[in-house]
Structure formats: C-alpha cells, structure tokens
Image: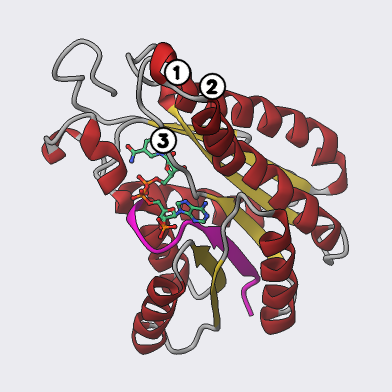
Amino acid sequence: MKPAVMITGATRGIGRSLVYAFAQRGFDIAFCSGREEDCFLLSEELKKRYPDNRYFARACNVADGAQIKTFVTSAQDALGSLKILINNAGVGVFDSFTNIRAEDWQRIFAVNFMGPVMLCEELIPLFLQNEGYPKGIIVNIGSYSVEKYVPGNIAYAASKGSLKTFSEDLFCEYRKDGICVTYVSLGSVNTGFSRRFSANADLKMTPSDVAEAVASVAELMLGSKNLCISQLELRTTTPPEAPGVKE
Ligand SMILES: NC(=O)c1ccc[n+]([C@@H]2O[C@H](COP(=O)([O-])OP(=O)(O)OC[C@H]3O[C@@H](n4cnc5c(N)ncnc54)[C@H](OP(=O)(O)O)[C@@H]3O)[C@@H](O)[C@H]2O)c1
C-alpha cells in the first residue's frame, strides 16, 4: 500500500491537479481548502474515478492553528500514517507598498508562511514515527517572484521568500532524521490565481505540468533512502510577454 499524502488548497488550480496526480499513482489523500462543499464534491469525483484509494476531505483554513490540529488528527485517524505533506494553499495581495494595509500583510503571511509552519509542526512528530526512509517528505510551493522583481508583488514575494528560507533551514535541520524538504519555485501557471498578471493562458504552464513534476519528484524521493531534492524550479518555455509580467 502507498503512503498517504496531505495536500492543502486542493479544490482549485494546482492543488486540484496535485490531488489527481497522486490519486492516479494510487496514493491515499487527505486534502483541504476553505470550503467544505468544494472538498466534498472533489472527494465524490475522486471516489468515482479512483475508487481504490482512500480520501479524507475537510474544510481547513491553514491560517488557523486550531483548524490545522483538528484536520491533521482526523486525517491521521482516517488514513493511518501520513508520509507526504504538500503545502500548496496560497493567496496573494497585489498592490504597491503604499497601498497595502497591515491586515493584508498579516493575512498573506498567515496563509503563505505560518500555515506551512504550523502544518510542519503537527506533521514532523508524526513523520518521525514512520518506519523506513524517507520518514517524511514536505513540499512547499513557492514562487519565482522571490527571484525577480514584479511590480505590485512585494507582500506576496516576501511571504514566499520567507517560505523558501524556512524550507532550506528545515531541510538542514531534519535531513539527518530522514525527512526531506523540497521548496518548489514556480513561474506562471494557468490558474485563477495568475489571471491577474496576464490573461494569455498559452504562455503559462498548466496546473497538470506542475502536479506531474511534483508527484514524480516525490516518488523519486520515496524510492531512495538517500535522495532529497531540496529545490525544484519550474518555469514556462515562453519568455514574458512584456516587462513586469511574471515569468
Ligand atoms: N498560479 C501561479 O501562477 C502560481 C505561481 C507561483 C506560485 N503559485 C503558488 O501555487 C499555489 C497554488 O496556487 P493556484 O494558482 O493553484 O491558486 P488558486 O487557483 O487560487 O487555488 C488556491 C487553492 O487554495 C485554497 N485556499 C486559499 N486560501 C486557503 C486557506 N487559507 N486555507 C486553505 N485553503 C486555501 C483555495 O480554496 P478556497 O479559496 O476555497 O479556500 C484553492 O483551492 C499557491 O501557493 C500559489 O502561491 C502559483
């Protein structure tokens, strides 16, 4: 039996494709997003298409520590040992520094940074109890906007930059214990999230491109005692259409 994977922000965009990529590979999956109804509908779809896997789907706001605790405990009870965590849920606040309010900074850091931190706090002790190597895999979905200035992206890029630093240090802290941490830097992907930058879907990667890459990398790490792919950068083959447009 394949180990169970937990995916946040799973009902739309990249998260939804991640759920399908892991379901197709025979994994049991715990997933969440902000809306219970969307989670239920996706779970019903999956049960029809991949009936051999088990699914645990709940609403869970990753900015809320109490909701995370309940989600992780219930997922563990339902699916047994979890081995992979994909911190995918993310939000943006896109405006100039002058216009961004304190509440916006707090919300974007709560979801994009503290959410992954709190999920790691809950899951690492569980991973350490797993048999064999690797004991656990953590994938943090980041952004190429950390590497490159994009006007209006200051709060989002800062939150993902913090996630990148956190990922690298967490990797260094836990690699000796058999926990792999992978930070994924993404260029533009065709989802509702990225439409504010450019409507031209042809220039972007598809959510499925990203999901297949992440699932393949996770499988490679699961299959090796000593391999940890600590960073992955996925970028579109088409150069940006105009200065300031995200790659
Ligand atoms: N699309 C891109 O071009 C791009 C580029 C670089 C990085 N990324 C990153 O990739 C990840 C996925 O982005 P996407 O493009 O797939 O976004 P998306 O289409 O907007 O989907 C985001 C998903 O996250 C869920 N979500 C949002 N806030 C949440 C919260 N507080 N708690 C739990 N779930 C939450 C959403 O559901 P609800 O709204 O119902 O909660 C939805 O299922 C994000 O981390 C994003 O920063 C995207």
Q: What SS does tag 2 mark?
A: helix
Residue 227 appears in view: no
The quarter in which the C terminus is drawn is top left
10 Å neighbourhood of mark 3: few (<14), some, or many (≥20)?
A: many
Residue range highlighted in magenta: 1-13
Q: Which residue is mark 1?
A: 154
Image spot of residue 28 (x, y percent): 57, 76
What residue sits 71% from the left and 43% below the top?
117
Residue type, label 2: Ala
Image spot of residue 183 (x, y percent): 58, 36
Image color mode: secondary structure
C-alpha gap between disc 2 and disc 3 = 11 Å
Image spot of residue 239 (x, y percent): 20, 20
Q: Which residue is mark 2?
A: 158
First in sequence: mark 3 or mark 1?
Answer: 3
C-alpha gap between disc 2 and disc 1 = 6 Å
Q: Residue 123: within the magenta?
A: no
Q: What SS does tag 3 mark?
A: loop
Q: Is residue 106 above or below residue 90?
A: above
Quarter-of-image position of residue 71: bottom right
Residue type, label 3: Gly
Marks 2 and 1 in Cβ contact (< 8 Å): yes
Instruction: Name the disc covering residue 92, or none.
Output: 3
Can you tell me whether the CB of the residue at mark 3 lies under 8 Å from the nearest atom of ligand 1? yes
Q: What SS does tag 1 mark?
A: helix
What residue sits 80% from the left and 59% below the top?
127
